[in-house]
Amino acid sequence: MPKCNWPDCEYDGLESGGQHVSGVFYCWDHVLPRLQEEVIEGLKKLPQGECHISGSLLNRLSRLLESRDVGCPHKADIESRARDFQIRGMKVRFLIDRHPVGRVYVQEWEFDVENRKAEMLSEELVESEFKRSGDDFLCPECNEVLDITAGRALCQCGFERYHETHPKGW
C-alpha cells in the first residue's frame, strides 16, 4: 500500500486510502490541502482580472470546488461549462450554465481558494420549456403548478419529465 507523501504524515497505507495529486499519493486527510496548495501556486502565475483557466489548473480547481457543500457544481460540469473566469487575489469567479430538467440557468460563483469556501452570487433563468406563474413552473399539459426539482418535474395530471442523469431519464 502507498504511503502518504505529506510531510510528517504517519499514514501507513492500511486504512481507507487516498488519491493521487499530480501523480503523488496523499491520504484522504491531505488530498485537499495539497490540491489547495497547487491551485494557489497556479493562480499566482495568472494575471488578475479576466483570464483563461484550463488544463491541469482547471482540473485541480474543479476537484477542490467539488469537495465543498452540496449545491456546488460538479467537477465535470465545471470543466465543460464554466466560463468567464476572473481572478481577484485568491478568489476565483466564474459563470456556469446549469441544466436542471426543462430549464437552463446561468449561475455566478465565487470560490475563495485560501479558505475553501464557495458561494453562489447570482442565478438567472435564461431558458425554460415550462411556462411560469410567479416563481412557479406550470405543467405544459394542464397548467397546474409542477412539483419540480433539479432532476424531475411532476404533475398531478400524470405529466412527468426527468433529467438525463435521473435514473428514470436513462
Image: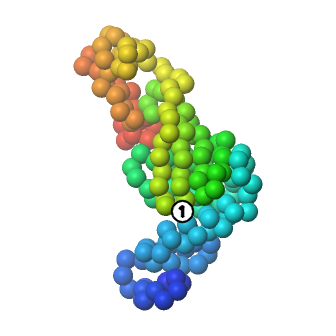
Q: Amino acid at mark 1?
A: Glu
Secondary structure of residue under mark 1: loop
Q: Quadrant of residue 44?
A: bottom right
Residue ID at (55%, 59%): 113
Residue ID at (36%, 82%): 15
Residue ID at (38%, 16%): 134
Q: Is residue 94 above or below residue 36?
A: above
Q: Quadrant of residue 27?
A: bottom left
Q: Is residue 158 above or below residue 38?
A: above
Residue 117 is left or right of residue 156, and the answer is right
Q: Nearer the viewer, residue 3 or 49?
A: 49
Mark 1 residue crowding within 10 angstroms, few (<14) / some (14–19) / many (20+): some
Reading the image, the residue beneath label 1 is: 114
Quick check: can you spot residue 67? yes
Type of colouring: rainbow
Q: Is residue 28 above or below residue 88?
A: below
Q: Residue furthest left?
A: 156
Residue ID at (39%, 40%): 166
Quick check: can you spot residue 3? no
Spot occupied by residue 46 in the image (x, y as percentages of width and height): 73, 58
Q: Is residue 41 above or below residue 99?
A: below
Residue 43 is left or right of residue 102, and the answer is right
| Quadrant holding the C terminus | top left
Spot occupied by residue 108 in the image (x, y as percentages of width and height): 55, 39
Spot occupied by residue 45 in the image (x, y as percentages of width and height): 73, 63
Spot occupied by residue 74 in the image (x, y as percentages of width and height): 49, 50
Q: Residue furthest front?
A: 89
